[in-house]
Image (spheres, rainbow, N blue to C red):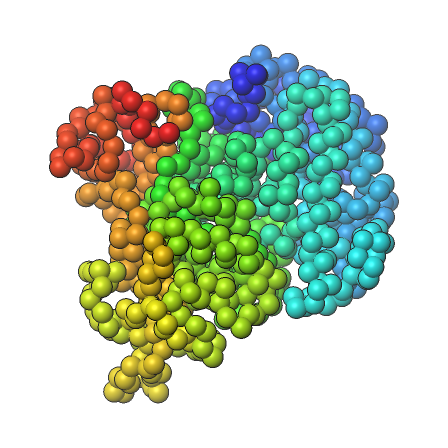
């Protein structure tokens, strides 16, 4: 059966967006399929309609919902793709409707609280509502008709709620039936009715996907279906909750490789952030990171070959499949050729890339509840209007802090996974030596109880700022749920801002080894806590009255504390420490957390003669005596887009606690590597690291299961 499940093997997925209907008439199906095959793609998303300007009922296959069908392109193209070994998933647009087409179907459309139809999607366009019975019937009819073709599956672009929706008649009636009240008109996160509205939107999207899957598989049981799901950002805004959607899709994909406008403002490791999240949320199903070949906003201008290779490398290094999308008109540029190079590398090494899992011993906690109910900025994306304002509910920005923590760990060459609330179960946590929770403020009692038991049983915790200070709906508690784990009790709350203020190291604890000064810039906001069983490593100084004045004395407020709890330990930072790192990249902040990771978890790999701009991940193939070290080199010329990556020479890889390998090979260099045993560690030397390398080690035993 597994051999029949082609989607569980490494995929290189193309999406060359078809032009408008007039141009589709000119396309040679065989030439198009051949071009994709030469570029190393083994799967694709193929458009089935003219979506330029939004869905308008012009389809390229025989369907009862078509207003017109200029060409049955699907019947001509499918045999050409299949004879070249390309699996075809139909791109099916369920989120964007042309304005003029929408005027014919006003009952399909999302409506804001003022009763106005949303008409500015992507600058001009409507968005359908999943609770419209007539639109659901229309869209499911199209899926049913697609299933009569020899397609391998369907990819749904959408559905999603537009910010501030939906108040259409269908949503209002359904909400009233379910909750007995009207949809609230005001965004008030303290209002139980608003929370019900957030839940209602999540459930509505999930119900649509459930019924779309039923429609497809009733006709074609072996076809797969998946949708454009949520990446690492607050999900309430579009109402796509990956965990509840996984029951109804065969893969999990998100736009982790879409880079917008000024690339200097984009995290280098955006695809890796997405891939790590998807892996923990996918229930063991394959994951896909969607990589836009263009520098988005300028959809016809391609990223550089170096940026393209790095997007691919980050995706593969974190266990996901790459999807690469460009318009058909720009599908011959240098960036596309770079994608082809990466595709061919994947296809030439599938035996090493299939069915791999991470063996990290550190878990980084992403709290969906905190992203929804605390305060988290929302990164720019196509579907997010620039004018969206997020209510200033709390002092810290959860997303910024998480992003800062992620970068800090990558730059410290730490091996780690992302975990979420559903992962907070003892049987899952016990594979980790350390959990890091950057201001995961809003957690349930059950979640807190599990983390408490994990630490009591010998696990370790690094936590910051308001972690566990709110319930799962953002309601402030009188005491931290994990106060005894932190070894503190709550004081008078948050204080700040502190924009030119300091904290002082007051202990020689190993956590501060290598820190460059005893006096350090402090986070912009702190939270007052009173030590009970913990002891301070750093204290806040009193607030600076002005610049260029005498330094004020220590305050009574601890900034960093260490506490022993049961068999484990907790490092608690009483401030928005990781937000500060995200903004200013303070090297001593990074050193302290790197020290904490070293002291509180097992070190599996270290890199010598290697800059911080190299990411490392460690994966293995369960049931095989094989481990894979992925190295992604972001060392560019101090700007973005990166035009060329500076090679790292004579990089030394030290593996701790593993058996001696019988074989080591660098796949990109296509050469065997020498290794030596030094103080019971395995040491390999990589002659040169360009953008990406995978080092494969094989042993005579299976030590990684």
Q: Nearer the viewer, residue 83 or 493?
A: 493
On the rendered structure, is 349 left or right of 476?
left
On the rendered structure, is 281 left or right of 682?
right
The spot of residue 15 in percent (x, y) is 57, 31
Instruction: Tell me which residue sits at (79%, 64%) in the image.
Output: 114
The spot of residue 475 in percent (x, y) is 60, 67
Number of disc labels: 0
Instruction: Tell me which residue sits at (33%, 68%) in the image.
Output: 534
The spot of residue 486 in percent (x, y) is 39, 64
Q: Quadrant of the N terminus?
A: top right
- Identify the image quadrant of residue 246: top right
Seen in the picture, residue 95 relative to 552 is either above or below; the reply is above
Q: Nearer the viewer, residue 45 or 20?
A: 45
Q: Nearer the viewer, residue 672 or 190?
A: 190
Q: Is residue 635 visible?
A: no
Q: Is residue 336 visible?
A: yes
The spot of residue 283 in percent (x, y) is 55, 36
Instruction: Tell me which residue sits at (38%, 67%) in the image.
Output: 487
Identify the residue at the far top of this view. Answer: 83
Q: Quadrant of the C terminus?
A: top left
Seen in the picture, residue 272 relative to 324 is either above or below; the reply is below
Q: Nearer the viewer, residue 212 or 429?
A: 429
- Identify the image quadrant of residue 444: bottom right
Instruction: Tell me which residue sits at (69%, 54%) in the image.
Output: 199
On the rendered structure, is 350 left or right of 695?
right
């Amino acid at each position: 059966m597994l051999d029949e499940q082609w989607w569980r093997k490494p995929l290189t997925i193309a999406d060359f967006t078809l032009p408008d209907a007039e141009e589709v008439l000119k396309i040679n199906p065989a030439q198009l399929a051949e071009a994709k095959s030469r570029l190393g793609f083994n799967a694709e998303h193929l458009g089935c309609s003219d979506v330029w300007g939004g869905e308008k009922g012009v389809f390229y296959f025989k369907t009862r919902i078509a207003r017109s069908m200029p060409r049955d392109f699907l019947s001509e193209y499918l045999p050409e793709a299949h004879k070249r070994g390309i699996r075809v998933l139909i791109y099916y647009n369920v989120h964007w409707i042309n304005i003029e087409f929408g005027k014919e179907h006003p009952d399909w459309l999302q409506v804001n609280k003022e009763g106005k139809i949303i008409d500015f999607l992507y600058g001009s366009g409507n968005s359908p509502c999943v609770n419209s019975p007539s639109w659901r019937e229309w869209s499911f009819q199209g899926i049913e008709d697609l299933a009569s073709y020899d397609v391998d599956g369907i990819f749904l672009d959408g559905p999603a709620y537009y910010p501030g929706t939906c108040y259409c008649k269908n949503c209002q009636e359904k909400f009233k039936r379910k909750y007995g009240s009207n949809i609230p008109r005001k965004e008030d996160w303290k209002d139980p009715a608003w929370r019900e509205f957030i839940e209602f939107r999540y459930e509505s999207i999930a119900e649509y996907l459930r019924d779309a899957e039923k429609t497809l598989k009733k006709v074609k049981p072996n076809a797969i279906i998946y949708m454009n799901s949520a990446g690492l950002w607050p999900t309430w805004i579009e109402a796509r909750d990956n965990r509840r959607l996984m029951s109804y899709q065969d893969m999990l994909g998100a736009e982790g490789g879409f880079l917008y406008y000024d690339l200097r403002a984009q995290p280098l490791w955006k695809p890796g952030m997405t891939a790590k999240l998807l892996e923990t949320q996918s229930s063991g199903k394959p994951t896909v990171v969607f990589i836009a070949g263009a520098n988005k906003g300028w959809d016809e201008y391609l990223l550089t070959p170096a940026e393209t290779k790095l997007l691919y490398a980050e995706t593969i290094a974190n266990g996901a499949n790459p999807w690469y999308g460009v318009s058909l008109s720009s599908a011959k540029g240098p960036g596309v050729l770079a994608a082809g190079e990466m595709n061919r590398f994947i296809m030439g090494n599938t035996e090493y890339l299939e069915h791999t899992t991470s063996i990290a011993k550190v878990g980084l906690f992403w709290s969906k509840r905190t992203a929804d109910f605390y305060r988290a900025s929302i990164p720019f994306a196509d579907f997010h209007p620039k004018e969206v304002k997020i209510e200033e509910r709390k002092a810290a920005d959860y997303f910024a802090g998480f992003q800062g923590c992620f970068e800090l760990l990558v730059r410290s060459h730490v091996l780690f996974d992302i975990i979420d609330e559903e992962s907070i179960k003892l049987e899952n946590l016990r594979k980790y030596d350390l959990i890091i929770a950057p201001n995961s403020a809003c957690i349930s009692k059950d979640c807190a109880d599990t983390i408490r038991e994990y630490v009591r049983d010998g696990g370790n915790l690094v936590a910051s700022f308001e972690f566990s200070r709110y319930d799962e709906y953002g309601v402030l508690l009188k005491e931290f749920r994990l106060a005894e784990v932190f070894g503190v009790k709550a004081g008078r709350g948050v204080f700040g801002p502190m924009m030119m203020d300091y904290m002082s190291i007051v202990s020689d604890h190993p956590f501060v080894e290598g820190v460059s000064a005893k006096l350090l810039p402090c986070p912009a906001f702190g939270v007052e806590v009173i030590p009970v069983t913990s002891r301070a490593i750093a204290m806040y100084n009193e607030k600076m009255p002005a610049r260029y004045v005498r330094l004020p004395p220590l305050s009574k407020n601890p900034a960093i504390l260490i506490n022993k709890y049961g068999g484990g330990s907790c490092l608690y930072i009483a401030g928005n420490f990781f937000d500060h790192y995200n903004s200013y990249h303070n090297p001593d902040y990074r050193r302290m957390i790197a020290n904490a990771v070293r002291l509180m978890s097992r070190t599996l790999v270290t890199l010598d003669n290697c800059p911080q701009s190299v990411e490392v991940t460690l994966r293995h193939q369960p049931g095989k005596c094989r481990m894979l070290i992925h190295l992604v080199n972001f060392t560019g010329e101090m700007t973005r887009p990166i035009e060329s990556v500076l090679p790292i020479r004579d990089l030394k890889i030290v593996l701790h606690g593993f058996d001696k390998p019988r074989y080591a090979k660098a796949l990109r260099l296509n050469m065997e590597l020498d290794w030596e045993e030094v103080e019971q560690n395995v040491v390999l030397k990589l002659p040169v690291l360009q953008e990406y390398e995978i080092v494969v080690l094989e042993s005579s035993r299976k030590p990684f299961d």
